[in-house]
Each structure stands twice: as structure tokens, then as C-alpha cells.
Image (cartoon, grey):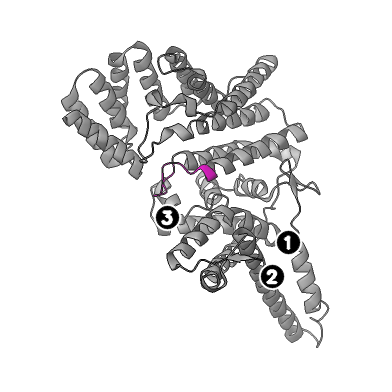
Amino acid sequence: MAAESVTDAADIAATVDAVFAAESARIVSAIVRVTGDWQLAEDSLQDAAVRALRAWPTEGVPRNPGAWLTTVAKNRAIDLLRRSAAERRAVLRIAHEPGAGDSAPAGDVAREEESMFDDRQVKDGRFDDGRVDDRLSLIFTCCHPALSMDARVALTLRTVAGMSVETIARSFVVSEPTMAKRLVRARAKIADAGIPYRVPPRELLHERMTGVLAVLYLLFNAGYSSARPEGLIDTALEAEAVRLTRLLVHLVDADGVVDAAGDRSESVALLALMLLNSSRDRARVDGEGMIVPLDVQDRSRWDHDAIAEAVSLLNGVTSELADRGEPAGRYYLQARIAAQHGVAGSADDTDFAQIARLYGQLAAVMPSPMVELNRAVAVAMADGPEPGLRLVEAIAASGSLDGYYLLPAARADLLQRLGRDEEARGFYARAAALAPTRAERAHLQAKTASLRR
């Protein structure tokens, strides 16, 4: 494989990190598929990354570094499997008569192990032999009902999204060692229970769908509001969540899973929601990395093809819900809200009264103080800051969102609109202190500074 010469250690490390982030989910998924061993998969990939750090400074970075890392990780997994097989044969020879463990020659073991790593072409989310994409199978495995929802989400973020244990721990507001133990327990439960690595058969799909949809949504949100220090948006993670959701819709359509719980309608609605939210990515951050609020974004930079596709998907779901007499689900309602922003030519053209009504419906389907906070903001936009502020202050008095930075941020914005700048400054400062990312802190600090001026 031809290589490019890059000798600077910092450049090499950055390249390895970037390739690792982009390829880790695919590589780990492939190895887990054939071995069922998460630890083996992660160890093999880590070994491959270490070897890259040693080899690339002298050999140069391969023209296809992802393929290089994949090959080395698979070879490492095969090597470990061979050693394990050799140990088993040795135990058999000791435990039984001589030669009892020799029935599987090393060459046959190697060929069998190598054949497990057969890379077929993927078309429309399925391999040529009909096998579903490894990462979707992995999500269904991670979302088995035997695991708690927290364990399902954490395991998927670690294995499929490739997020660090530290980042996941921060998202769950627990220590890194605590999260590491949870992940170990979740993997052990999958192994001990003999949970198969696969998309389940049709009759078992429904019991996993709620968890799978929730995990895909959280996966997308982890990219939409990235906690990584290098930026607010992780477009690669967003794209992976969109790709996997498309794959899920394809799977549900192919298997004809349409039931009273709205598996198909919610899957399609979730895809529409992701498309609508990611359509604004190019306008959400300026050239200096500062957040650009929705009401002042350059809407010409939005992805209008994605918005058109999402609206078309939503129209189809609306018709299906009406035909089947199904109630609106949480992802459908959230997508309808996002679509109100997506189709508006400007902030002034946005139908905030309709958004407030949709948030009211969402609160009935998915009671949450976060939903109530968003509804309060929509009410403020539709009816003025005073009624919105009353709703926000009621949420604050309940204590349900203590420590959540957007509560004081919303309060500050409404106070500022009412001309109560001194109070607004204090809440902006509080929100900045609670903000989880550098970009959000900088945005709120700038708001505080503008009020001082």
C-alpha cells in the first residue's frame, strides 16, 4: 500500500486519532460480530493504533489509513484467537489421551478465523449476502431489554459512536471509574445471557424498537451538541446517526413492521428530525467558532434539500397516522416543531403559536421539564416575554432543572427583552458557569459582556 511521508510526531498522533475516531465503530463492530468478544475487539483496535504510532513515522502514513488500521486490528484479533485455540488444544492433550486436541490443525484454524472477516460490499444498508450492517446489529444487541436504558445508551455510545469513557461519564454525570464498571457489567451480561449479535427476527423487533430509537436519537444529539473540545458540532457522528436511522427505516420497511405502536412512523419521523436539525449546521457557528443563535442565522446556508426531504417524510407520516388512527409520537411531534423553523423564511415568519401548541402535545406524550422550558420559550415568542417568563420562573421554582444551563440562559434572555438588564446579567453569568462546552460558555459570556457595555 503506497504511503505518504509524514514524520512529525504531532501530525502522526493527530492522524491516528482522526482515523481511530472515524473507523473504530466499524472495526469493533466487525470483530464483535465474529467473536462476540467486546474486549478482544477493543484490545485489537488499540493494539493497531499503537502499532500505527510506531510504524507511520518511519514508513509514512498509508494512502488509506482506515484500511491499514482495519487490517492490522483484524490480524491482531486472529493472532489472539489462534493463541486461544492453541491453549485449548494443549488443555485437551493434557486432559485426554495424546493427540486428542489435534483434530483442528493450526492452518485450518487460521483459515476459519480469516474467513470470518469477509468484507462484502454494502448496498442500501445490507451486504450482498443480505446481512445487515454490523453497526445496526450491534445497536440491537446493545439495546436488549435485559439491559437497563442507561446501560444500553452508554454501551452504544462507547461501541458504536466510539466515544471515550470520560465523555460518556460526563454525559451521565458520574465518575469515569463508575462508568467503566457499568460498561464492563453490561458486556458481561450480554455474554453471560448469550444474547445473540444480530438484528432480531420480526416478532422480536418491536420490543427493542423504543430503545433503539432512543439510542439513535442520543447518538445524533451527541454529534449535534458535541462535548468534544475541538468544536460544538461533530458532523461525522451526526452523519453516522442519520445513516443508521436510514438503515433502520429500510429494515422496518423490508420486514413490514407496522403495528399499533408506530414503529415505522416513529422511525421515519426520527429520520426527518435528524435531517431538519442537521440542515442548520453550516449556519450554527461563525468563522471564529462562536455560536450563531437560530433567529439570526443565515438561512441561505441551511441545507434546503435536507429540509425538503424531511418535510416530505413528515407528510407521509401524517397521512399514515391519520389512516391508521394512531396518536402522534414523540419523534413525530419534535420533527413537526423543527419543520416549523425549517420552512420559515425568517425568524419573524415562524409560527411560534403552532410551535407552542406542538410542545403542549409533546408534554402530554413525553412529560419533561425540558419540554416545558421549550414550550415557555415558544409562548414568549408568540405572546411576549412576560407570559413566557412566568412559565420559566415556575420551572425554576420547581427545582426540576437545577444545574441545567439553558434554564438561566432562557431566563436571562427574557429579562433582557423586558429591559431588566441587571437581572439578565446575573443569569447569563450563571448559565455560562454551568455550560458544558467551550463554545456555549463563550456565547453566554459574550451576552454578559454585551449587557455590561
| Pointer 2 residue | 78
User: SS of the residue at dot 3?
Assistant: helix
Which residue is pictured at 74% across the width and 80% down the height? 89
Q: Which mark is residue 166?
A: 3
Q: Nearer the viewer, residue 60 or 241?
A: 60
* Quadrant placement of the C terminus: top left
Give the mark nearer the N terminus: 3 vs 1.
1
Q: Which residues are magenta?
A: 226-237
- Estimate the x, y position of residue 105 in percent, counting from the top left: 81, 79
Q: Which mark is residue 370?
A: none
For the residues labelled 1 and 2, say whether their Cβ atoms are less than 8 Å apart.
yes
* Quadrant placement of the N terminus: bottom right
Residue reaching furthest to the right: 103
Q: Amino acid at mark 2?
A: Ile
- Estimate the x, y position of residue 342 in percent, counting from the top left: 51, 22
Give the mark nearer the N terminus: 2 vs 3.
2
Give the mark nearer the N terminus: 1 vs 2.
2
Prevailing secondary structure of the magenta residues: loop
User: SS of the residue at dot 2?
Assistant: helix
Q: Looking at the image, is 37 positioned above or below residue 339?
A: below
